[in-house]
Amino acid sequence: MIQDAYIVSSIRTPVGKAKGVFQHVRPDDLLSFILKQLLKDNPGIDLNMVDDIIVGCAMPEAEQGLNIARISSLLAGYPDSIPGLTVNRFCASGLQSIAYAADRIRLGEADIMIAGGVESMSMIPMSGNSPAFNIKVFNDKNFGIAYGMGTTAEQVVKKYKITRDAQDQFAFESHQKAINAINKGYFKDEIKPYKVNTKTYDLDSKQVVQKSVIVTQDEGIRLDTSVEQLTKLKGAFHANGSVTAGNSSQMSDGAAVVMLCSEKALKLFDLTPMARFIGFSVSGVDPKIMGIGPILAIPKVLKQCGIKQHEIGHIELNEAFSAQSLAVANELNLNFDVLNPLGGAIALGHPLGATGSIRTATLLHHLKRTNTRYGMVTMCVGVGMGAAAIFERL
């Protein structure tokens, strides 16, 4: 018999720009920090009942290699008895970790699971620490595997006839919605402020100067951007392309975690759930147009869950690019009134493997705030995939 899996806590760090405020902060420190905060928010939990910690990471190498889930949990002071698993489904890694954790509970194999995601694009570049493609990737049949993300976005522009004006307008609105959300304090419940300590050497005094800053909000939002400014930017990936730095997601650093429980654990520890995990799906598409992945993943998860598209009152569609976001929304006739109401990755950042769990935190807190029943997190995924998950507010 399938059990229900409930989310009782969903928190995240602020998102920093790559080479920005978190550029010298190790990803395992970001993750261990947010894991500690999760315990502080749930002091009555018996840690001996936590069955596993599953963490998504898109480039699990170098500073975020060596099974960062396990290492970070130990750095956070979790008991040795709690294992850790790092998973990689590129941009959907943070969402995939939540789905895996929920499945353990739904199958009756666990009562308490912790899931999340982490990524430092300051320390680990987009293609990984030391990429080594199979030479077969470069034949005609497989060449799409080698396409950069920007190139796939330009392919989507051509196939789905997405105009430059539409892309820039979408990007502008992402920033405006994010600015509005910050002004109204909508991210405060999900973000845990992070203290960054730095040391510099003062040549005049010949002394080491220590400084600290408390990061309380996402760094990438451009308060002064305008459509006019966005239209002046040149194509970032093709000489005559329409995909620019302004209408693309930002490379970022960040981490997020959720705690999932069975009904047994809810009753045992008198916990109030935020939401119920309903379902998750993944799909595959041509790698050359990887951005359209949600076009297949969304109908798939809706059918699986027995929910109609119009019943979804909040959709977090990760904005890898304006082009692919518009292609997905137009093809599926998504309701723009419920699409990324607090902005998306163009404004808020996209720390790859962490994004799925970050967008989940934003979704769940806003469902509660607006008394909305169903919400969805969905995204395109590198090398031609799409992912989508549905949650029900309780």
Image (spheres, rainbow, N blue to C red):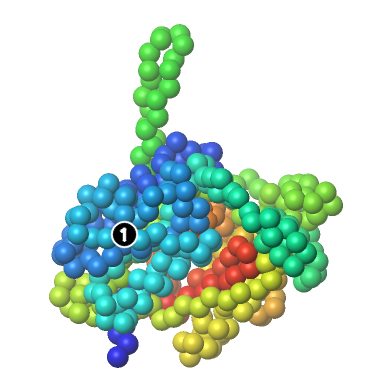
At 42% from the left edge and 77% from the top edge, which residue is drawn?
A: 391
Looking at the image, which residue is at 21% across and 72% down? 271
Q: Which part of the image, by quadrant, shows the C terminus?
A: bottom left
Where is the N terminus found, in terms of image quarters? bottom left
**Residue annotated with mark 1:** 84
Estimate the x, y position of residue 121 in percent, counting from the top left.
52, 46
Residue 185 sits in quarter: bottom left
Instruction: Rate crowding at label 1 as few (under 14), some (14 to 19) or many (20 or more) other CA atoms within 10 Å.
Output: many
Q: Would residue 100 be seen by someone viewing this image from the given angle? A: yes
- Residue 363, compared with residue 33, is above or below; it is below
Which corner quadrant of the image does residue 393 belong to?
A: bottom left
In this picture, residue 129 sits left or right of residue 236: left
Tag 1: residue type? Gly
Q: Secondary structure at mark 1?
A: strand
Task: Say which of 367 and 86 sits in front.
Answer: 86
Query: Which residue is nearer to you in this view: 167 or 117?
Result: 117
The structure residue drawn at horizontal position 38% and vertical position 37%, both measured from the top left corner, is: 196
Where residue 277 appears, as percent x and y from the top left, is 38, 77
The residue under the point 47% across, 48% down is: 61
Q: At which x and y percent is residue 214?
A: 38, 39
Quick one: 271 or 296, which is closer to the camera? 296
Q: Is residue 233 above or below residue 139?
A: above
Report x, y in % for residue 78: 22, 54
Residue 192 visible: no
| Residue at the outermost front position | 135
Q: Is residue 318 above or below residue 65?
A: below
